[in-house]
Amino acid sequence: MRYLALCLLLLTTLPALAQSKGDDKIILALENGWNQAQIHHDAKALESLVADGFISTDNDGTVMNKAQFLADTKDMSYKADTVANDEVKVQMFDKAAVVTGRYHAKGTEKGKAFDHWGRFTDTWIYESGRWQCVASHTSHLAR
């Protein structure tokens, strides 16, 4: 877990010269790190990925700020064995990126099995030499 946190820290603090055509790959790596941080309840790693003004809208309509989102990450009654994205597209702008895709989360919550599929949209901003997510929205897909 320390390795994951270190990798995320390095990725989020790359110098300004990293602001280039390769940023879409950095964004994808940050998205994948986010998934691993959720599996391991690593709020510290997620804290470095989301901006202070971060807003998360969950598939049940719950809206959380950064503090609420990080507290939710620590909830041990939620245990995801799988958190993965596919159909991911990154749209790059000058100092922003919008990531869309499909996610799959599988595990247990409060002792009950779940197998969720959904769509997501994450908005990233490049500021002070690093990428941070400012907004995340998920929508449930019926299977």
Image (tube, helix red, strand yellow):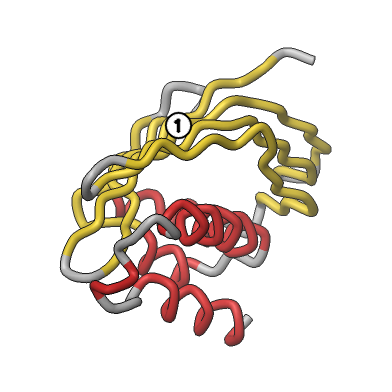
Q: Which quarter of the figure has residue 20?
A: bottom left
Quick one: label 1, few (<14), some, or many (20+) residues within 10 Å?
A: some
Front residue of this view, candidates 43 and 141: 141
Q: Position of residue 84 (x, y in %)?
A: 71, 46
Front residue of this view, candidates 132 and 44: 132
Identity of the residue drawn at 18% across and 61% down: 127
Residue indicated by mark 1: 121
Q: Residue furthest left?
A: 128
Image position of 10 with respect to 29: above or below: below
- Name the kind of residue labelled 1 in the image: Thr
Identity of the residue drawn at 54% across and 22% down: 139
Front residue of this view, candidates 91 and 112: 91
SS at mark 1?
Answer: strand
Q: Quadrant of the N terminus?
A: bottom right
Image position of 85 with respect to 46: above or below: above
Q: Position of residue 130 (x, y in %)?
A: 28, 67
Is residue 141 shown left or right of residue 97?
Answer: right
Q: Position of residue 49 (x, y in %)?
A: 38, 62
Q: Residue furthest front?
A: 21
Image position of 105 with respect to 4: above or below: above
Q: Quadrant of the C terminus?
A: top right
